[in-house]
Image (cartoon, grey):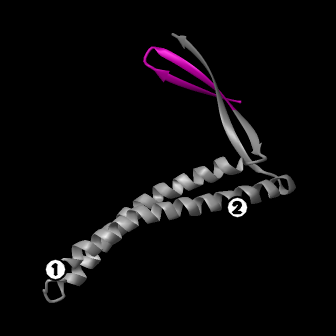
Amino acid sequence: MTNLKFTHQQTTQTVDCMVVEKTIQKIPVMSFALMLACVGAVIGIIVGIFYAVAFGAIFSSIFNNLPSTGATTFMPGVFGLIFGVAAIVVIPIGAFIGGLIQGIIVAVVYNFLAPRIGGIKVQFKEDNQTTGTT
């Protein structure tokens, strides 16, 4: 047990910190998989926005160098829009599905191995606060 003393103006506060070590013995498969899938989807949205901007710039520069005819003046905007929307919609969906599959596999493998080789040890800090004025 560690005692820490914090002083702020007229009040003295003593915090007793006790570190408790626990072992993760089992991971709930679907809650872990859904969390990993949601994290993947958020990252997929960010990546999709960057891809949408990149596709817009690439198609704009490619089609601006072509000779102007009736068909090619309409193309850069359409292709940039199609690939941009596809990137913002398809990449997060793919990342969600990939994260879900990855989360299921990782949780099942962890639950299989944890009883055999030991789980992950995690340390938690519990605070017991006692406040007094001086």
For image coordinates 86% across by 56% down, the residue present is 116
**Above or below for 118 versus 125:** below
The label nearer to you, 1 versus 2, is: 1
The foreground one among 93 and 107 is 93
- Residue tagged 1: 73
Q: Residue furthest right?
A: 116
**Mark 2 element type:** helix
For image coordinates 85% across by 52% down, the residue present is 115
Which residue type does callout 2 highlight? Ile
- Left or right of 41 in this view: 4: right
Which residue type does callout 1 highlight? Thr
**In the rendered structure, which disc, 1 or 2, sits on the residue that comes first in sequence?**
1
The region drawn magenta spans: 1-18
- Left or right of 48 in this view: 119: right
For image coordinates 77% across by 44% down, the residue present is 23
Looking at the picture, how far across and down is residue 84, in whole percent? 33, 67
Q: Quadrant of the N terminus?
A: top right
The foreground one among 124 and 13 is 124
How far apart marks 1 and 2 lie (CA) works out to 49 Å
Q: Residue furthest bottom?
A: 67
- Left or right of 110 in this view: 72: left
Looking at the picture, how far across and down is residue 3, in whole percent? 64, 27
For image coordinates 39% across by 67% down, the residue present is 87
